[in-house]
């Protein structure tokens, strides 16, 4: 019954089951934080095995001993069958697929209530496991205290029950793996110095009602998390590389406070209500052997880390608004005149009441908001044509999601919609304008509020925002190693104050950041680019020339840049050229992680 499918790439191994808390969507964040070199690989809570399959596909597990553990006996049986009997397994899965229905699902789920369940052959049990996994609610595996599956059926139109490509490629990847139905604690019997151990246990619950820890009949709460911590510490003392994923909670952060804790952003899907899903912060905990070294990365690895961790915007509310530049303007209509009712209302409650009434009576007034702070003409018109939206950060923290404003008027104005744009009106400064600055007619004043209309001024503010976001991180590292930090200084300042010889051709240039220690100097230039007007190849050539000129003055150069609009669309070969011609290129992600710090330590020989 097995279908003969062509072109199975056995090197593109991937998980053959869905798994709650699986790392498939986080690999771009997790993989860069792993050591570049290690001996053997251990995954004591294997689950869906996303990280194992990714490392295998990258060739990083070649010629290494691989150990995959899990206390879930049905899961481990399934792994062994996938490894040893993939064809027989697939044939059986097609039988399950042909019988699939709601009644059949609950019939199969009930098999583990029968006394002779464990007498079933391994292939049948593995087929049952995969069948339930592919057809249950959200791919959740959960059992009760009697180790009986109790997950309801999901609503899938055509579940991929017999995924031949996934099973055959997984089977190939598992050929040299030791698969054990064992406790994670048993890793202590096998792991040694230089081995990589990755723990992905049931997460500590974010709230008392958010626990999905019953992947086996055993719970995994405070006591179990503390026992895992002790195993983590023993492995650390052995000299193993230890990595541990968990929820970003006070309990976990306190428990591992003496180790390296990195925050990563994950998508949360395990909720019966879609409103309960979305982005959530997790932590990746590493022992001190795990610091990332920029110089150990290949050019291809640098490119991957750089491009997969770009940020979309550096625009905060202050990017758009500079009230000092208010001047006259001459284009308004009925909606702008209608805004006159808000002028001079000091009482905040009354102001909001009038604002709400105005939007309900004349919803199109919301279209004038981009005019009030004078967006550039093209961007304003693109918003009206629904070709673009405003993404605005709440502050300079580039890690947070941007707030989104599209200025599209819904058929019915909800309270939430009005509140959203009232909050926008207030936070961008327009409420203050109407309460305290305007006196008579909106037309007399709004026409003069250029609010940073000139592109040059806005470009300066955008660049400054990126520098402001980067400066605290750079300053913290400088303080850590006793490095002097200069900001926005000309290079001739080094000559006058530090007696460092500087060529005339760069003496009058201003540097974003200059780092000095023991007469060694680093120049850091920080730029954030959007797609508009940015030419990556010219940028690379320009800063490669700057690096050359600085080198003639014995100054090292680090190029700190970001912006998915520019660098996310660059030709692969152009970016590789950049990493070849400029010694150190980092983005904001690499600045926050150890990559930037490793460069500083190398240059200053710390």
Image (tube, rainbow, N blue to C red):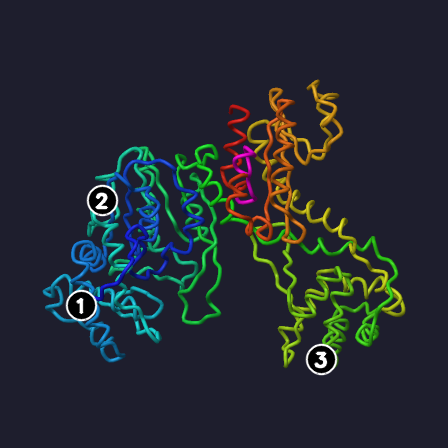
Of badges 2 and 1, nearer the viewer stands 1
Q: Name the side, left or right, on which 257 lies relative to 7.
A: right
Query: Which residue is at a point 65% across and 37% down the rendered structure image?
Result: 542
**Along the line of sight, the residue nearer the viewer: 312 or 58:** 58
Q: Earlier in the sequence, mark 3 or mark 2?
A: 2
The image quadrant where one finds the N terminus is bottom left
Q: Secondary structure at mark 3?
A: helix
Of badges 3 and 1, nearer the viewer stands 1
Measuring from the top left, give residue 526's x and y in whole percent.
64, 40
Query: Which residue is at a point 23% across and 54% down the rendered structure image?
Result: 171
Magenta segment: does it hold 588? yes
Res. 186 mark:
2
- Specify start and end residues of the magenta stretch as a single range: 578-589
Magenta segment: does it hold 527? no
Measuring from the top left, give residue 310's x and y in whole percent.
54, 49
Distance from the alpha carbon under mark 2 to that under mark 1: 33 Å
Could you tell me if the residues under marks 3 and 1 are in contact, i.e. CB atoms within 8 Å? no
Picture quarter containing residue 121? Answer: bottom left
Q: Earlier in the sequence, mark 2 or mark 1?
A: 1
């Amino acid at each position: 019954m097995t279908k003969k499918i062509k072109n199975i790439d056995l090197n593109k191994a991937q998980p053959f089951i869905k798994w709650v808390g699986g790392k498939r969507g986080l690999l771009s964040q997790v993989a860069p934080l792993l050591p570049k070199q290690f001996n053997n690989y251990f995954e004591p809570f294997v689950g869906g095995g996303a990280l194992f399959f990714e490392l295998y596909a990258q060739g990083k597990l070649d010629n290494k001993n691989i150990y995959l553990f899990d206390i879930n006996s049905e899961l481990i049986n399934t792994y062994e069958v996938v490894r040893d009997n993939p064809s027989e397994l697939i044939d059986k899965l097609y039988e399950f697929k042909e019988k699939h229905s709601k009644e059949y699902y609950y019939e199969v789920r009930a098999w583990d209530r029968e006394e002779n369940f464990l007498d079933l052959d391994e292939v049948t049990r593995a087929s049952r496991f995969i069948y339930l996994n592919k057809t249950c609610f959200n791919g959740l595996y959960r059992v009760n205290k009697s180790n009986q599956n109790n997950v309801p059926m999901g609503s899938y139109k055509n579940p991929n029950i017999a995924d031949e490509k996934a099973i055959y490629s997984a089977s190939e990847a598992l050929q040299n793996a030791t698969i054990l139905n064992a406790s994670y604690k048993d890793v202590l019997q096998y792991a040694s110095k230089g081995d990589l151990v990755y723990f992905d246990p049931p997460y500590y619950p974010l709230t008392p009602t958010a626990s999905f820890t019953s992947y086996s009949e055993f719970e995994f709460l405070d006591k179990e998390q503390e026992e895992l911590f002790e195993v983590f510490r023993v492995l650390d003392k052995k000299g193993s590389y230890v990595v541990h994923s968990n929820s970003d909670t006070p309990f976990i952060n306190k428990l591992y406070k003496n180790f390296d804790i990195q925050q990563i952003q994950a998508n949360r899907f395990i909720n019966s209500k879609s409103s309960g899903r979305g982005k959530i912060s997790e932590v990746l905990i590493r022992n001190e052997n795990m610091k990332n070294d920029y110089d150990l990365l290949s050019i291809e690895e640098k490119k991957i880390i750089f491009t997969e961790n770009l940020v979309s915007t550096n625009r905060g509310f202050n990017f758009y608004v500079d009230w000092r530049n208010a001047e006259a303007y001459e284009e308004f209509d009925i909606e702008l005149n209608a805004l006159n009712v808000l002028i001079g209302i000091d009482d905040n409650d009354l102001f909001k009441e009038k604002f709400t009434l105005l939007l309900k009576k004349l919803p199109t007034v919301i279209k004038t908001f981009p005019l009030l702070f004078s967006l550039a003409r093209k961007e304003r018109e693109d918003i009206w044509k629904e070709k673009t939206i405003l993404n605005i950060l709440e502050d300079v923290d580039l890690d947070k999601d941007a707030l989104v404003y599209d200025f599209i008027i819904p058929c019915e104005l909800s309270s939430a919609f009005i509140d959203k744009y009232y909050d926008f009106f207030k936070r961008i400064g327009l409420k203050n304008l109407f309460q305290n600055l305007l006196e008579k007619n909106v037309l007399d004043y709004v026409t003069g509020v250029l609010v940073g209309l000139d592109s040059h001024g806005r470009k300066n503010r955008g660049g400054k925002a990126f520098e402001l976001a980067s400066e605290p991180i750079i300053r913290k590292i400088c303080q850590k190693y006793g490095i002097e930090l200069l900001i926005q200084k000309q290079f001739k300042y080094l000559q006058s104050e530090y007696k460092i010889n500087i060529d005339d051709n760069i003496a009058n240039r201003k540097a974003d950041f200059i780092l000095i220690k023991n007469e060694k100097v680093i120049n850091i230039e920080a730029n954030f680019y959007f797609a508009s007007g940015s030419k990556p190849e010219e940028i690379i050539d320009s800063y490669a020339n700057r690096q050359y000129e600085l080198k003639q003055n014995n100054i090292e150069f680090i190029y700190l840049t970001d912006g998915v609009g520019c660098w996310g669309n660059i030709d692969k070969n152009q970016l590789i050229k950049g990493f070849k011609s400029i010694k150190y290129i980092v983005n904001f992600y690499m600045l926050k992680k150890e990559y930037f710090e490793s460069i500083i330590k190398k240059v200053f020989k710390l």
